[in-house]
């Protein structure tokens, strides 16, 4: 079968997994029966245990679904700690359902796959050796890639039914009250992990910092926690967030950032009380810097900044240019450490951030978002999942979710090295063109033809040439030529869910 | 059938309502499948509506369960506003499931009962004309009385399945982010209402204070809210909490308060890091005052104070004598207004406060609690529900829940006017004697015989004579004589649940 973005989907798998093809970015207003956990009541007198191994062996069974969060990012020790025990005990057929997988987890996941310990994975993304292994057919069943909002939706609906959540925290008391704000390995918002704490049947906190009872604020509450395991170290503080927040000095990136800002400032959304999500990375920080100056120059303040948060966004909050920071994840130490100091930096869960199946998420109120792309095609579809070699090396993240903003800007260079960013058709369609409004490149911008209003508004901004996206694609092709078409086998190695749980694309095994 | 506290229970009703008789205060560790709401997804663009009537008529159906909170107490306007509309539209057979009913709600509930609009009620309690009407058989089906923790448990298990929650709030934004801390009608903690917001299929916020989006902190989150209705006034600020916090000058009350403090101070629980719940009322405030001095004198600080919170408890927090205030409800303006200023005053939900069916509630960590009694009998069973005339005039509140503390003290005078407080058998058994440790009266104390350890510890405290509870009962009887036995009909008008959902007692129609 084909879906509405013209992707051929494997009938057998679609039927097996009870999937529907992607149709529309409009979620509608369905009535949904929520899932709820099975809870073992306790007064909590013996929650604190020394042995992670004991918790695993007394609770885990073959075939279960286990989850983790990725808030420690490349500084995570918890994932490996738990997975080592699981592999050593020879468990089989587990489903791995973390909020995402970082590179530091790759080796152990590959080992778990090879030994049949893990046979199913759902994640926001994967990179490096793991993405490579999966793209070469290492995993028995297709990976399910979900956006952050899509994961929240799937957990709430029971499509992801977590038996045991193993959640590393930088502090916890003996009953399991915990937050992400205090301690040596503080990472700020616990946004993604809040879903696991609410919906997993069993919740295991793992911490190196047992604090006095009662520990407040409690982002994770004692009512949700079965075990508190004390370990030596949950993470490497130096690798949790990027320490420095350096602005790009690359002239091309600066050009793009300036143009992104020109698009925002000249759009109808740039007015007092607007909201935005800029994301992380040097280019995003540059956008934040330009936007800051424009806000000052025009006397405009924002009602909220959303998303993964960086220090420069906190600076805007402290300057009074942004009234609230709605924070599902912190990308650097500055943002992580300010959460406990700034009441206006509100921790939000993944469902509040981006779930299409609740009664209104932050992304539903978002005016402007700047997103990246590995590829964008002439229908404005975006790929943030597979590289130019067809291999998995990315993550859906909040891409699909935030693209529902009123003004969705994709910021991308025409080419990267010898590879075109703008292509006739994306290798993997992650975010449908219907939700993308403007592409900004160093050469100029392209506006989605379904946004005639924006075309009218932006057609004569000084220094911002407007092209059709086909023209930009041609420019890119001129620079680097036509690539050889990629070759894949017939085997599906991953399904990419749209945030509503339909299938927007699949990823096949690469042919070497 | 009889339950383990020797109360005769009506077999037919027990079977009809699928109830088990009360057995033990020990909840055990059952595994419980939680209930979850049915949610209508929305992006929230049209949540704000002017007409409460429209919300009611478009969503309410005969036979549904509706809920309210009682945080506005005697200053509540919301309950009457909603119920008027419901009565005017002639709805039938509704179940009323508020967190409790205050006197200001009595007239309209009686009208709703008389007109067949409301045929079932579950509440923490009722007083005045409503208690009188129900005790005289006004309601078709028996009222179900539940403790605050028991209500949380019943909501989580689906025994209370709320179709629509009507929740008044002192502030909300257009998406439904709300808290109890800001605005003219601020009442502090939204503790009880948090259950309704999480578990009701539809959540209607009613506010007189629509604030800028996004409103933080959000105790109730936009993801939970279907409608935000703007009205002129949600309550009378002067009647929400007792303004003044006057200490009692009654010598008998002061004597009891001092003795309560002597019991605490001489118990093994009075040590650094202990925890307590004192409750409200002039006598409770006097206990807090004595306790404060003892803490200073002995260099002892408390890890937390729990429960319905008053300003004197906040003073202890600000003095550093208490490290955390765990706050499910605020009894006065001082406590309500300090919540937004004191990060150590943590808002907790009813489940976190007292639910026996989660993974650990605050009451499970409670060392010392002081509770009141309308009657206490020679088996230490406590009645806080029916008066000496057998008429309903009280509330379970957190009584059963907090009585699970390590040291449960009932503070009560031997007699009130011509009525004995200590009786051979309570009229209505609300809190089983097995969970009560010490009775403190102005004449002396009695210690539950199953607490031989306490008897040993407290037997020689200067100025604190120890009696058996039979001796104290005799003293009371000597003062006021034996009352005529109460007369009831065979008709059951109310079931009193123990916090675990079994039936500890029933209340019958009074014979006039």
Image (cartoon, coloured by chain):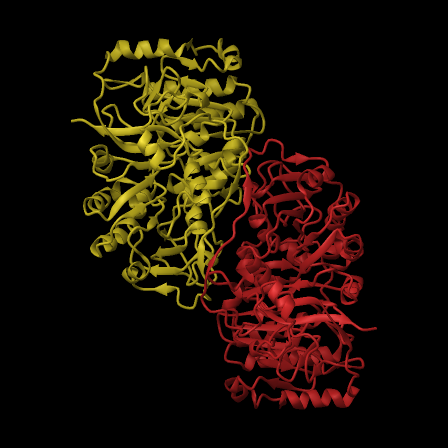
Chain colours: A yellow, B red
Q: Is residue A345 left or right of residue B120?
A: left
Q: Is residue B15 left or right of residue A52?
A: right
* Residue shown at the point (66%, 50%) measured from the top left: B66
In-front residue for pair A53/A299: A53
Residue A333: quarter of image: top left
Q: Up-down: is A451 above or below B502?
A: above
Residue A374: quarter of image: top left
| Residue found at the far right of this picture | B512
Please state the total of marks drawn on the protein image. Answer: 0
In-front residue for pair B403/B287: B403
Question: At which x and y percent is residue B116?
Answer: 76, 53
Q: Up-down: is B78 above or below A465?
A: below
Q: Quadrant of the C terminus of chain B?
A: bottom right
* Residue shown at the point (55%, 63%) measured from the top left: B354
Question: At which x and y percent is residue A221?
Answer: 47, 55
Q: Is residue B74 visible?
A: yes
Question: At which x and y percent is residue B205?
Answer: 65, 43
């Amino acid at each position: 079968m084909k879906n509405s973005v013209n992707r051929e989907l494997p009938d057998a798998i679609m039927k097996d997994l009870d999937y529907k093809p992607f149709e529309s970015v409009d979620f509608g207003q369905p009535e949904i029966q929520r899932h709820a956990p099975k809870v073992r009541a306790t007064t909590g007198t013996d929650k604190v245990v020394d042995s992670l191994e004991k918790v695993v062996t007394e609770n885990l069974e073959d075939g279960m679904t286990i989850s983790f969060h990725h808030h420690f990012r490349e500084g995570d020790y918890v994932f490996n700690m738990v997975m080592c025990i699981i592999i050593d005990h020879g468990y089989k057929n587990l489903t791995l359902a973390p909020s995402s997988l970082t590179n530091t987890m790759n080796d152990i996941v590959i080992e778990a796959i090879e030994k049949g310990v893990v046979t199913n994975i759902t994640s926001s993304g994967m990179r490096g050796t793991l993405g490579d292994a999966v793209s070469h057919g290492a995993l028995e069943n297709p990976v399910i890639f979900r956006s952050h909002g899509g994961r929240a939706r799937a957990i709430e609906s029971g499509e992801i039914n977590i038996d045991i959540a193993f959640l590393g925290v930088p502090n916890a008391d003996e009953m399991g009250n915990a937050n992400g704000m205090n301690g040596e390995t503080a990472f700020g918002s616990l946004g993604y992990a809040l879903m696991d704490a609410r919906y997993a049947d069993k919740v295991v906190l793992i911490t190196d910092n047992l604090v006095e009872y009662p520990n407040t604020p409690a982002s994770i509450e004692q009512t949700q926690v079965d075990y508190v395991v004390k370990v030596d170290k949950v993470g490497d503080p130096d690798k949790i967030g990027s320490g420095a927040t350096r602005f790009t000095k690359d002239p091309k990136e600066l050009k793009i950032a300036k143009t992104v800002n020109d698009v925002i400032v000249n759009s109808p959304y740039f007015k007092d009380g607007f909201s935005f999500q800029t994301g992380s990375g040097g280019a995003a920080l540059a956008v934040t810097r330009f936007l800051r100056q424009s806000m000052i120059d025009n006397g405009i303040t924002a009602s909220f900044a959303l998303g993964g948060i960086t220090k420069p966004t906190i600076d805007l909050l402290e300057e009074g240019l942004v009234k609230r920071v709605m924070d599902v994840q912190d990308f650097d130490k500055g943002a992580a450490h300010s959460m406990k100091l700034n009441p206006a930096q509100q921790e939000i869960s993944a469902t509040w951030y981006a779930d299409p199946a609740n009664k209104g998420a932050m992304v539903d109120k978002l005016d402007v978002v700047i997103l990246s792309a590995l590829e964008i095609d002439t229908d404005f579809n975006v790929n943030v999942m597979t590289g130019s070699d067809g291999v998995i090396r990315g993550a859906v993240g909040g891409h699909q979710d935030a693209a529902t903003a009123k003004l969705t800007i994709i910021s991308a260079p025409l080419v990267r090295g010898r590879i075109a960013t703008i292509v006739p058709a994306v290798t993997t369609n992650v975010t449908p063109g219907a939700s993308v409004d403007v592409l900004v490149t160093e050469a100029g911008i392209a506006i989605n033809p379904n946004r005639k209003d924006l075309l009218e508004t932006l057609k004569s901004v000084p220094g911002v040439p407007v092209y059709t996206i086909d023209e930009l694609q041609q420019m890119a092709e001129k620079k680097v030529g036509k690539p050889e078409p990629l070759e894949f086998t017939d085997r599906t190695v991953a399904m990419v869910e749209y945030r509503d749980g339909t299938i927007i694309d699949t990823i096949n095994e690469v042919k070497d």
